[in-house]
């Protein structure tokens, strides 16, 4: 075990002991709002089937929203970043639409789209699209002009320019945008599930909070935290693979 792993393990154990000390031993916190660790652990085991169903529902929405965003934003970002005239033309629209919080589209998505699943995928798509799109453009702009000029000089085709020159060159910016997109997409997923879902991690927390069942609320928050940790760890490994040439 590396030193970093040991440090993280010690921090986790310290946090768990502090939780146990403040709830079960010293009774410093309201037991209605702050359950004991063993109580939460018991609920994690009891509700494991509900959590598995919620995870499947949440991951389905997250997968389709993020996949559609990546399939559209990265190619468009490469094209727009490469074409200066096109980039300057759409820059005002990008500056206006990009910063708008995607959560404001939720009422319209629910009203216009026929199902909650489609509405949620659309909201996640919007949230994941803009960071990826704008970072892809920035990555192409940051690419050394001499590389692009040399490729043009030797007659590289447009397809090869996009896939073999611009895409690898912009990849550091793309993965940075991807990390932002993933975090934002998960936040939007949880928010959407809290509003109109009948399953999912966000629904689980909202449903039991309405009944003041805070032990289950804490259990749901812990599961969400673990899921985010796993997703970011996997994304970091994917980033290391995509940028392995930098080593």
Image (tube, rainbow, N blue to C red):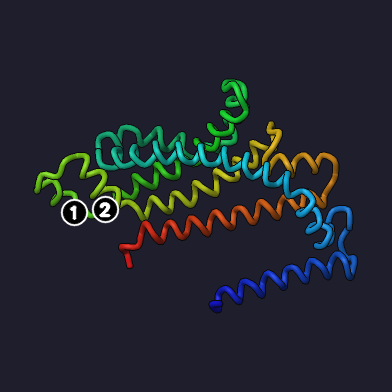
Tell me how many marks there are. 2
User: What is the crowding at mark 1: few (fewer than 14 residues within 10 Å), some, or many (at least 20)?
Assistant: few
The location of residue 243, given as percent across then percent down, is: 35, 59
Q: Which mark is residue 147?
A: 1
- The answer to whether residue 243 is above or below residue 99 is below
Label 2 residue SS: loop
The location of residue 149, given as percent across then percent down, is: 15, 49
Find the distance from the CA under tag 2 to the CA under tag 1: 8 Å
Q: In the image, what residue occupies the spot 85% across and 44% down?
A: 212
User: What is the crowding at mark 2: few (fewer than 14 residues within 10 Å), some, or many (at least 20)?
Assistant: some
Q: Nearer the viewer, residue 133 or 45?
A: 45
132 to the left or right of 110: left
Q: In the image, what residue occupies the spot 59% across and 36% down?
A: 103
What quarter of the picture does the N terminus occupy? bottom right
The location of residue 142, given as percent across then percent down, is: 29, 52
Q: In the image, what residue occupies the spot 78% across and 70% down?
A: 18
177 to the left or right of 141: right
- The answer to whether residue 76 is above or below residue 32 is above
Q: Nearer the viewer, residue 21 or 201?
A: 201
The location of residue 219, given as percent across then percent down, is: 75, 53
Label 2 sits on residue: 143
What quarter of the picture does the C terminus occupy? bottom left
29 to the left or right of 152: right
Residue 83: quadrant of the picture: top left
Q: In the image, what residue occupies the spot 72% across and 69% down?
A: 15
- Whether pointer 2 and pointer 1 mark residues with C-beta atoms closer than 8 Å, the reply is yes
Label 1 residue SS: helix
């Amino acid at each position: 075990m590396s030193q970093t792993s040991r440090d993280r393990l010690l921090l986790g154990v310290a946090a768990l002991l502090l939780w146990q000390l403040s709830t079960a031993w010293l009774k410093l916190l309201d037991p209605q709002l702050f359950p004991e660790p063993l109580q939460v652990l018991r609920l994690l085991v009891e509700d494991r089937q509900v959590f598995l169903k919620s995870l499947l529902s949440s991951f389905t929405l997250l997968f389709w929203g993020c996949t559609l965003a990546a399939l559209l934003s990265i190619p468009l970002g490469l094209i727009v970043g490469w074409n200066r005239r096109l980039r300057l033309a759409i820059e005002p629209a990008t500056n206006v639409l990009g910063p708008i919080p995607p959560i404001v589209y939720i009422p319209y998505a629910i009203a216009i789209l026929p199902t909650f699943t489609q509405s949620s995928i659309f909201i996640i798509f919007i949230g994941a699209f803009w960071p990826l799109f704008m970072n892809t453009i920035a990555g192409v702009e940051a690419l050394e002009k001499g590389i692009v000029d040399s490729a043009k000089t030797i007659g590289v085709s447009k397809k090869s320019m996009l896939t073999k020159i611009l895409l690898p060159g912009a990849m550091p910016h793309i993965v940075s945008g991807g990390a932002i997109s993933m975090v934002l997409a998960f936040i939007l997923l949880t928010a959407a599930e809290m509003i109109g879902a009948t399953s999912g991690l966000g629904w689980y927390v909202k449903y039991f909070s309405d009944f003041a069942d805070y032990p289950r609320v804490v259990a749901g928050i812990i599961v969400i935290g673990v899921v985010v940790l796993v997703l970011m760890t996997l994304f970091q490994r994917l980033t290391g693979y995509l940028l392995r040439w930098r080593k």
